[in-house]
Image (cartoon, helix red, strand yellow):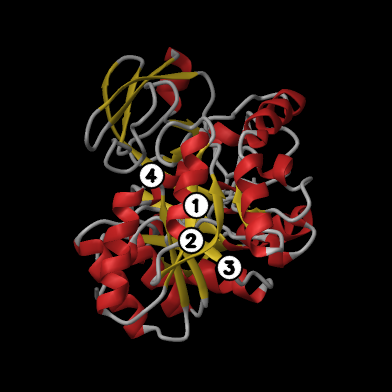
Amino acid sequence: MWYLLNKPEEVISPSLLFYKDRIENNIRSMVHMAGDANRLVPHVKTHKTGEIVKIQLNAGVSKFKCATISEAEMIAEAGGKWILIAYQLTDINIRRLFELRKKYPETTFSSLIDNEQSAQALEEYSAAEDFVSTIFIDVNNGMNRSGHPTDGLLLSLYRFLSGLSNVSVSGVHIYDGHIRNAEFSERKAHSDADFEKVFPLLDLIREDIGTEPVIIAGGSPTFTVHALRPNVLLSPGTNVLWDWGYGDQFDEQPFLHAALILTRVVSKPSAGVVTIDLGHKAVAGDNPIDKRFRLLNLKGYTVTGQSEEHGVLQIGEEAWESIKIGDVFYALPYHICPSVALHEYASVIENGEVIDEWKIVARNRRLTI
């Protein structure tokens, strides 16, 4: 089995495992599917790791997306020169952005704007610093989490932004994470319909600047949809590690599971019950109990409970008899992104051996800024 460690006794539990060759394979697949590494703006929120940023840079990726100042700092420290903070910054985080720019003056940092008030605040900070801030207009074409709705006022927002002296519109950001149809044709139809709602804004920008606007669209679910659109940059994130949730749902995306959590049996409190050291402090608990992790080397079990440091399994009597305290299981998270953020380090695996340890540095909300 690809995931088995030669010496699992040398790895603590619960422990995050990164399979380096599979990560490299997934990054190559992302580039191949995009057609050109320059079309990729991968989101780092999944792995939060400088070493993986460097692997992406070596694969030709030159643009990155993130959600926090610490993630942006991690990318810049790893050598990234073009970073979109895909978040609308307020108050102290705007000040932190300017500190980041001063620390990495050769790196281009952009952020999102979806309303005039936030734009005016950024304008004032930028004017005080004698700096022109680059932004992307965040468009809500159905996600209903952030972004300006695709109504007539969206065009007014662009005109307002165009009149500011210290804010410059670099392009449009369109995240459609609400589109998760398992069938590709249905996902594409849904994405196409929602994408068309942004056409009036794109037409206005095109008329205003005389060239095609920079468009960053989609995430992992619609990666394969937006890859079919010319002149659109793509921002998959989960694909670099992949997980149970997306892996079982999107058949047309040939990515490999590249991150697991090693866990051990710590108790057999009663007949048919096995307890492992995989609580919701080690694997994401944002889904129902039956969709948190899948044990790759155990069959015929049901996850019946989970607390901070324990995972409780119900298992058949015969299998229960064969399981021993200390037995090692390999858990595939249903949602890898928040699962990674629960760990300070990942053991890096190659050919069954632990070859390195990478710090999940950007799990912290603050690095040096």
> Which labelled disc corresponds to residue 338?
4
- Mark 4 neighbour class, 10 Å CA radius: few under 14, some 14 to 19, many 20 or more: some
Q: Label 1 is placed on what type of residue?
A: Tyr
Tell me the distance, in whole angstroms, between the alpha carbons under discs 1 and 2: 6 Å
Q: Nearer the viewer, mark 4 or mark 3?
A: 3
Residue under label 1, please give it: 158
Mark found first going from the N terminus, 1 or 3: 3
Residue in view at x 37 percent, y 33 percent: 324
Q: Label 3 is placed on what type of residue?
A: Lys
Q: Label 4 is placed on what type of residue?
A: Pro
Camera sees residue 28? yes
Residue 345 lies in quadrant = bottom left
Residue 181 x, y percent position in the rendering: 64, 24
Residue under label 2, please give it: 162
User: Which of the pair 155/242 is nearer the observer?
Assistant: 155
Q: Are marks 1 and 4 in contact (CB under 8 Å)?
A: no
> Which labelled disc corresponds to residue 63?
3
Mark found first going from the N terminus, 4 or 3: 3
Instruction: Using the image, determine if residue 327 lies above or below residue 78.
Output: above
